[in-house]
Amino acid sequence: MKINNVILQAVTKIAVFIILTLAVYLFLSGHNSPGGGFIGGLVLATAFVLLFIVFDIETVQKAIPFDFKRVAALGAFLAVGTGFGSLLFGEPFLSQSFGYFDLPIFGKTELATVTIFEAGVALVVVGVVVTIILSISEDV
Amino acid sequence: MNNILVLPMVIPVLAGILLIFLRPYIKTQRWISLGVMIANIGISIYILNRIQSEGILRLDFGGWEPPFGILFVADSFSAILVLTTSIVTAVCLLYSFSSIGKAHENMFFYSFVNFLVAGVNGSFLTGDLFNLYVCFEIMLLASYVLIALGGKKIQLKESVKYVAINVLSSWFFLIGIAYLYGTVGTLNMAHLSERIAESGQTPILTVISILFLVVFSLKSGLLLYYWLPGSYSAPPTAVAALFGALLTKVGIYAMFRVFTLIFYHEPGITHTIIGVLAGLTLIGGSIGAIAYKDLRQIVSYNVVIAVGFILVGLAVLTPEAIEGSIYYLMHDMLVKGLLFLIAGTMITLTGMTNIDYMSGLIRNYPFLGWMFFIVMLSLTGIPPFSGFIGKVLVGQGTVDAGAYILLALAFLSSIFVLYSLLRVFLNCFWGETIISEEDEIPMKKGWLIPCVLLTLATIGLGLGAESVAIYVSDAANTLLNPNIYIDAVLHD
Amino acid sequence: METLITILSGVLVSVATYLLLSRSLIRVVLGSAILSHAAHLLIMTMGGLKRGSAPILGEETESYTDALPQALILTSIVISFAVTALFLVLAFRTYRETGTDNLYALRGFKDE
């Protein structure tokens, strides 16, 4: 069954980028205001799900050749790993630290290890959501 | 800084994640997960010994001092349970190497076992009520997957029931946490205990405590055990053994912790209810154990009886009874694992579950038969096996407290345990052999060795009760004197 | 405001109870999801509904918002999200395997 959904596909190609931008914005703004890894990851996952709905699964997987189970595992590894990293410095588990750095373009920027943790969370969410959607939809 | 406290939870989590990447290398997966459990045994023995010399240990996550941050607290009770968990899981993993099958191993079986252990250890070690909820959920999520893994009809059907009942009990847990936070304004267990001791356990707090009682009863199968026999008989043997040995015990641990540390001011209400529930559980479990002919159901109902027995100790709340419960908890984790493994092996060997059709197995598999006999004696509480000391101490405690009905029920239930298992023994191992020499499925070493290890453990715990006595009495002492725990967490 | 939210969460609980007791498997899954939302609302209410101040407690600040209930809710949303997703997959697999989503019919299966 092939439905001619040119309009949906055309809109999706633009909309996906808007969603991805929103996801990155939510992810980064999570540091000091509403947002964060979980929300950013969910929005990121909706972009993938939209792609899976509009194009078929094979096409998308050819373009994005990730095994999403591994993405989730990588995320969990990052998240737990940052907590574990503090052990190496003799700090209690899950301690985070931050510092101010002078970066070429951004100027004085605050960089915090908690961002890595959040990135891990975001990857877990993307991986899990897409895995679940795929496992339900794959064999209908 | 006691970062070592977090290792029993974090090592399994990291290993579980690592194993997802190592999906094709099954041999490596096996040895990594076994290695993790053995490392956990070592770590928990180290923690246990450090507690004896330094008192209760605590670790504040991210350096946030209690009561503001979340924290892990290890007293002897938690450390003993972490140790026993690691031993039982190591043995169950050893059993699963030769029994679980390629299909399971390919579908991340070892990862989920690791996550399950992480949840269980986290629940034992946490010092924060909400964190306890989170660790419970990690454990339950892993167990949902493990129970459904394989996807047979019976497994899916039981897992739907199991998930539904656990979602409901987790909801009650959340509601209880919400009410408690609204009333007392903290969720740190030591802080809760201190505040409730200051303000007195008002009726509303008693009601909240009963909400928690409902939650933990559902999780541990205290009276609300109707979901248990079905769910525990569906998954493969190694998984069933893990469930039978670990999952209900986490609920029991939570009940001990909450009702000795936080809600201990109104024993007339809460502990009487626990006593009544424990008595009814003993009766119900005993009826179930002798009513069924399905081996898996009989074994599952034996889990229920043990839950009732351990909580008799909590209900009477005397030092002897608590010590006895802790002994019995350790014993039960080891022996229930063994019982499930032996029952599963019998079912695999004969290909049937009804005890009426099995017969004369002792001629084919003498070693298995005698091990079953030892399990039976140990569960009944016959010296020198490990069940004895627990039963004696709990009995002594109930006599001291004058709870003669509970005493009678607890010891009558032992007779029912003996009867139900003796019936299995007579039916399945004695009588005419049904398996001829040619059809005999050879006993694999991988099935026998784990059973032997656990049998040795139950004999060892029985004979060496003296050597663990210092740990157990310290654990009981901490449970009965909440101030030790509070001082270690808040005022140090 | 507290009363309103409490009533709302009560309504959600009754909806969820109705769904959980129904025969269809998918309704049970939806019921479990709604049940957790009711719990989240309750946690928020029990933490005290306040707005307009930062979750910082210092010597100079006069009012502050308790950040803990929100942290609890966020954690519990993540957990309930995972559980609901897993339950959904499980329900779907059960439906595929048994060909029915009727819980009464599911009960009929004997051990194989």
Image (cartoon, coloured by chain):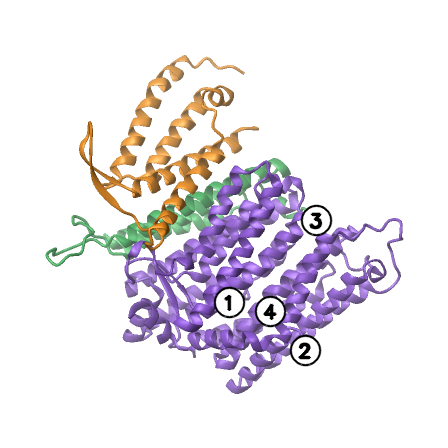
Chain colours: A orange, B purple, C green
Chain letter for mark 4, please: B
Q: Residues within 10 Å of mark 1 (few under 14, many from 20)?
A: many
- CA gap, disc 4 to disc 3? 31 Å
- CA gap, disc 1 to disc 2? 22 Å
- Quadrant holding the N terminus of chain B: bottom left
- Quadrant holding the C terminus of chain B: bottom left
Residue drawn at point x = 48 percent, y = 58 percent: B121
- CA gap, disc 3 to disc 1? 38 Å
Dot 1 falls on a residue whose secondary structure is: helix
Judging by the rendered image, the residue that carries numbered circle 1 is B80
Q: Pointers 1 and 4 in contact (CB under 8 A)?
A: no
In the figure, B17 relative to B330: above or below?
above
Chain letter for mark 1, please: B
What label does residue B383 carry, if any?
A: 2
> Given the image, on which type of amino acid does mark 2 rest?
Pro
Dot 2 falls on a residue whose secondary structure is: loop
Q: Give a yes or no on whether discs 1 and 4 share a subunit.
A: yes
State which quadrant residue B86 falls in: bottom right
- Of residue B487 and residue B269, the one placed in the foreground of this image is B487
Give the left or right position of residue B183, taking residue B239 as reference.
left
Q: Is residue C21 visible?
A: no
Judging by the rendered image, the residue that carries numbered circle 4 is B331
Query: Which residue occupies the extreme left position in the image?
Result: C60
> Given the image, on which type of amino acid does mark 4 rest?
His
What label does residue C111 carry, if any?
A: 3
- CA gap, disc 1 to disc 4? 11 Å
Chain letter for mark 3, please: C
